Amino acid sequence: MLKEDNNVTAVGLKSKLLGTDIEQRMLIPIFQDYNDKVEALIGHDFAPGTLERYRTSLKHTQEFLIWKYKTSDIDITKIDHAFIMDYDFWLRSVRKCANNTAVKYIKNFKKIIRICIANGWLSKDPFLSYKAKLKAIERPFLSKEEIQTIYEKEFASERLNQVRDIFLFSCYTGLA
């Protein structure tokens, strides 16, 4: 206790001897706290879609904990490389996520682990030897004939004509 620069008290010494001095930090409240902060910063630092992705990541993490450990939460000190590999396997097999989707969920989970490391709650990074790569996706593009067909299409609604025009504008300019 002296080496850790803590005050030595009778209560502190007793809890140290009994092992009750170690504060358990659980994964789900940490994850939920981060999601709450993201929600508070929507429109400033985050987009609504970012919050939705983190909420989905939290939901998947909870489902994984029930599937693998038969529990609704886990102490963050129990998260190791094997946990990450099992989570990755679960996303790909049970959830049937494609490679890029699984990698993105793991990346969201990694953000929470980085917060735990930064706060000193975890002594080592469970992602240290985990490597996952996004696979490049070949997106098909419209031919000139297909774009011309869209250009010539007349819709019954003026709103749909506007949507068509905006879509064609984005095709010609490269804007998403």
Image (cartoon, rainbow, N blue to C red):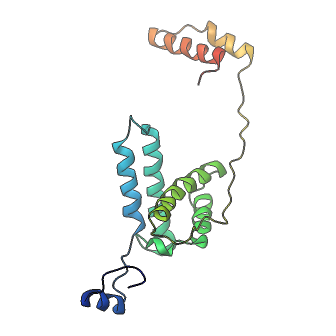
* Residue 149, quarter of picture: top right
The residue nearer to you, when weighing 96 against 31, is 31
Residue 21 in view here: yes
* 2 left or right of 176 in image: left
* 119 left or right of 87 in image: left
User: Where 142 falls versus 36 (above or below)?
Assistant: above
The image position of residue 124, as x and y in percent, is 56, 71
Residue drawn where x is 66% and y is 14% of the image:
172
* Residue 62, quarter of picture: bottom left
The image position of residue 101, as x and y in percent, is 60, 49
The quarter of the image holding the N terminus is bottom left
Residue 1 in view here: no
Q: What number of labels is visible?
A: 0
The image position of residue 95, as x and y in percent, is 56, 57
The image position of residue 53, as x and y in percent, is 48, 47
Residue drawn where x is 37% and y is 57% of the image:
32
The residue nearer to you, when weighing 20 against 170, is 20
User: Where 72 falls versus 148 (above or below)?
Assistant: below
The quarter of the image holding the C terminus is top right
* 132 left or right of 15 in image: right
Residue drawn where x is 34% and y is 92% of the image:
18
